[in-house]
Image: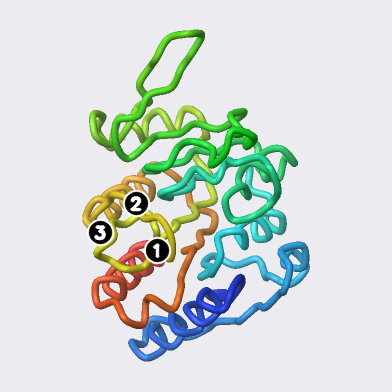
Amino acid sequence: MVTFIPFGEKPNREGVLYALQLLKRNKLIDDYVIVEASRVELLPDRVPQDRAYIIGEHLATYGIIEKLRPKSLISVDAHTDLMHDYLDHGSWLAYALERRLIERAVVMAPVLMIPTTERTQLWTRRVKVFPATLRSRKVRGKWRAYKNFQTNSVEEIMGEAKKYLGEEIYLTVDMDVLRPEYKIARFQHGELTLEELLEILEAIKENFKIIAFDIAEISDRLRRSRLGKKAFFEVFQLLMG
């Protein structure tokens, strides 16, 4: 079964319902359920234990993992979602780690690494970040490069992630990880092509047991984007296969 969660603002809600119609029209799903909630706190009691979730605002992932309680999580996303000011779509992963909904996490392919304001803290405990492009951080007064997808192979990064997380993971894929021409992201976008994203997802499938996954930040921009529809279909079919 596939669970559709039209959560968030109107563009996210409409985008998820449009994605449902697309998949039905192309005969890619038979069994599905729609779960609605006005607040993320309501989701754990409403979402079923499922293999696949199509969601609007990425904050909904917080409600899903509160229900499923996976030990480890991989997030493929243009953002780290590790801001630590208040619970929303930019901080859900930080609060999931802080509140022990998951034990460990890895973020793959982000391009936006830093807090939005000087007062915003960035959560760093029990999480590893592998940026899409070369990024550095200050460690004990010295600048050191993150392992990243620009200067390291996919195989190297998967090996590091597997040592850290173990074999069993929950996977969340934020479609804003793709470049702007896919016209999926409502706000900032990532730097991956569809081919690069599929390579990463194939490697995750090969290296990990995915207990469940979600495809996040689906919005009504999907309706007007030929490349966006193609990307959504290919990601969905790969993860369902």
In the image, taking residue 64 as reference, residue 22 lies left or right, namely left
Decide which of 199, 61 is in the foreground and name it: 61
Determine the image quadrant of residue 72.
Answer: top right
Q: Single out the mark in the foreground, 1 or 3.
A: 1
Measuring 49% from the left and 52% from the top, which residue is drawn there?
171
The local crowd at label 1, few if under 14, some if 14 to 19, many if 20 or more residues have their Cα within 10 Å, is many
Query: Secondary structure under badge 2?
Result: loop
Q: Residues within 10 Å of mark 2 (few under 14, many from 20)?
A: many
- Residue at 25%, 59% in the rendered image: 194
Q: Are marks 2 and 1 in contact (CB under 8 Å)?
A: yes
Label 2 and label 1: CA atoms lie apart by 9 Å
Q: Position of residue 152 (x, y in %)?
A: 26, 29
Q: Pointer 2: what residue?
A: 190
Apparent side of residue 161 relative to residue 156 in the rendered image (left or right): right
**Label 3 environment density (alpha carbons within 10 Å; few <14, some 14–19, many ≥20):** many
In the picture provided, is 137 more to the left or to the right than 238?
A: right
Relative height, residue 195 to residue 103 (above, below): below
Earlier residue among tags 1 and 3: 1
What residue would you read off at disc 3? 194
- The amino acid type of the residue labelled 2 equals Gly
Q: Which residue is mark 1?
A: 185
Point out the image quarter for the N terminus: bottom right
For the residues labelled 2 and 3, say whether their Cβ atoms are less than 8 Å apart. Answer: no
> At label 1, which amino acid type do we have?
Ala
Front-lying residue, 207 or 118 = 118
